[in-house]
């Protein structure tokens, strides 16, 4: 496992050089990048400018959120899909090998029709990234309160696992967010059945007490801890046993961080992650070498 600095907790935009400094200061082994921002920079000022800070950094890139609305209506999806070629090129340039793709909880069609449409779209995206050696991790919607369309779509953890299976691509797997996983009825037991090659990314985040999928908002995302109601410690124990070699991060909604300066946020995230790893028995050597 690689201790990863993710970006969700930083309120507003954080500059690339700031994120690099935070990552190095607080001993993260990898970091995320804002691919939407990089794409726009490349379009405006060229690939070299967009990638210059990342390429010069001594901390490697672990993952990025894929800035494509996979569940949009046809025109919106097609517009986003035009960005894929550039994103693939940027991923190669900065040696990024993993990305997350959020799957919406509502759809534009009835479930089975929407499922087939999304499955095919994901398969096409995966094929585009396969040549660059990039794996695509599917993740549950972070904010269940955002219901954009009329029809229900992926709102249960097992539905996401079924989608991953039926996409049927070697470079498609699970980007786990433990908060949305628990809100969607997911359990540790179901995660034990996920094969090692399907683990793409892990973000540790606890749901607020007495909140379920239907009542949750983005602010229900709390910093992961080691209390008994959290699955994080037992999950990390399993990942060590499994030999998971990808990124792992602690995250939360910015409202639940209580810090505003990037360095203070980095310190809080590093502390939370280290506490979980320590309680799980994942020593620093095991984290790096596993």
Image: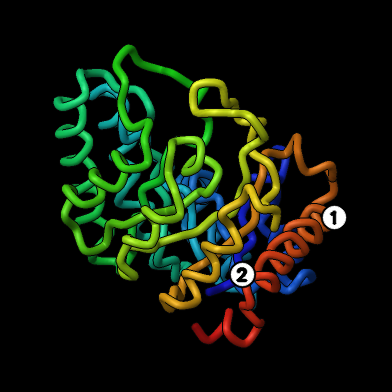
Q: Are marks 1 and 2 in contact (CB under 8 Å)?
A: no
Above or below, 244 relative to 193: below
In the image as oriented, which residue stretches furthest toward the top? 150
The residue at 29%/30% (across/down) is 77
The residue at 74%/64% (across/down) is 270
Depth check: give the residue in front, 25 or 202: 202
x then y, percent, for residue 187: 44, 48
x then y, percent, for residue 115: 20, 32
Q: Quick check: 31 left or right of 172?
A: right
Bin the neighbour count of mark 1 within 10 Å (Cα to Cα): few under 14, some 14-19, many 20 and up.
Answer: some
Question: Which residue is tagged 2?
Answer: 3
Q: Nearer the viewer, mark 1 or mark 2?
A: 2
Q: Quick check: 254 left or right of 185?
A: right
Bin the neighbour count of mark 2 within 10 Å (Cα to Cα): few under 14, some 14-19, many 20 and up.
Answer: many
Q: Quick check: 284 left or right of 79?
A: right
Badge 2 element: strand
Q: Quick check: 275 left or right of 259?
A: left
Question: Which residue is tagged 1?
Answer: 264
How many numbered marks does the figure carry? 2
The residue at 36%/60% (across/down) is 89
x then y, percent, for residue 169: 19, 58
The scheme the figure's colours follow is: rainbow
């Amino acid at each position: 496992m690689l201790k990863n600095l993710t970006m969700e907790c930083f309120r507003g935009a954080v500059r690339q050089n700031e994120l690099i400094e935070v990552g190095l200061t607080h001993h993260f082994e990898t970091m995320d990048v804002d691919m939407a921002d990089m794409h726009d920079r490349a379009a405006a000022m060229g690939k070299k400018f967009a990638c210059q800070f990342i390429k010069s950094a001594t901390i490697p890139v672990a993952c990025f959120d894929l800035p494509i609305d996979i569940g949009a209506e046809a025109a919106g999806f097609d517009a986003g899909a035009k960005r894929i070629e550039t994103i693939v090129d940027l991923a190669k340039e900065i040696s990024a090998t993993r990305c997350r793709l959020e799957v919406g909880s509502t759809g534009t069609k009835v479930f089975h029709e929407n499922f087939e449409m999304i499955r095919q779209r994901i398969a096409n995206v995966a094929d585009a990234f396969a040549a660059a050696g990039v794996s695509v991790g599917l993740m549950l919607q972070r904010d269940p309160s955002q219901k954009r369309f009329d029809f229900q779509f992926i709102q249960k953890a097992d539905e996401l696992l079924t989608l991953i299976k039926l996409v049927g691509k070697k470079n498609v797997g699970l980007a786990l967010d433990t908060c949305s996983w628990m809100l969607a009825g997911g359990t540790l037991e179901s995660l034990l059945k996920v094969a090692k090659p399907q683990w793409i990314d892990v973000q540790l985040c606890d749901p607020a007490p007495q909140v379920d999928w239907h009542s949750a908002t983005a602010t229900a995302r709390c910093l992961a801890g080691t209390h008994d109601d959290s699955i994080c410690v037992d999950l990390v124990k399993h990942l060590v046993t499994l030999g998971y070699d990808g990124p792992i991060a602690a995250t939360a909604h910015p409202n639940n961080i209580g810090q505003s300066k990037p360095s203070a946020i980095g310190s809080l995230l590093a502390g939370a992650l280290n506490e979980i790893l320590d309680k799980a028995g994942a020593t620093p050597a095991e984290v790096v070498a596993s």
